[in-house]
Image: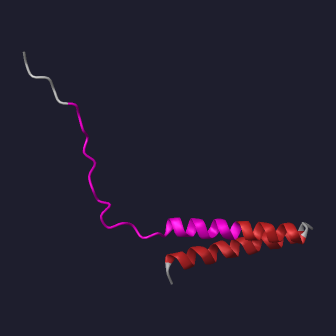
Amino acid sequence: MSSFATYLIGFIVLIAGLAIAAYLLNVPTTWIAVGVIVLLGIGILSATSRTKMRDPNSNTTIVERRPPTPPNA
């Protein structure tokens, strides 16, 4: 199983627990549904950003550029 799927399954379990807790606290069902949809979107976005494939050419070094020194007079 990929790390994306594992992350997403864990996030869905968290969302389910929060939805059940909201239901037990007598939160209106409409607001529970809105919260679940928003949290699913956040979960997908964060899972994608955390498990994104890294660019293999990203090992470039940063070169510091300095202004040229003036010639000795």
Indicate left or right for 59 with 5 as reference: left
Q: Which residue in the rendered view is the most extreme toward the bottom? A: 1
The C terminus lies in quadrant: top left
- Residue 9: where, in percent of width, then height? 62, 78
**Going 83% across and 69% down the picture, which residue do you hit?**
32
Work out whether residue 16 or residue 68 is closer to the camera in this orientation and state it: 68
Q: Which residue in the rendered view is the most extreme toward the left? A: 73
In magenta segment, residue 70: no
Work out whether residue 60 or residue 26 is closer to the camera in this orientation and state it: 60
- Residue 62: where, in percent of width, then height? 28, 48
Q: In this view, does 37 lie above or below 65?
A: below
Q: In which quarter of the image is residue 45?
A: bottom right
**Going 26% across and 52% down the picture, which residue do you hit?**
61
Indicate left or right for 32 with 61 as reference: right
- Residue 40: where, in percent of width, then height? 68, 71
Count of numbered circles on the image: 0
**Going 70% across and 71% down the picture, which residue do you hit?**
14
**Going 61% across and 70% down the picture, which residue do you hit?**
44
Magenta-tinted stretch: 39-67
Q: Is residue 5 above or below residue 55?
A: below
- Residue 70: where, in percent of width, then height? 14, 23
Colour convention = secondary structure
In magenta segment, residue 62: yes
Indicate left or right for 59 with 39 as reference: left
Q: In this view, does 67 lie above or below 59?
A: above
Q: Is residue 66 above or below residue 31?
A: above
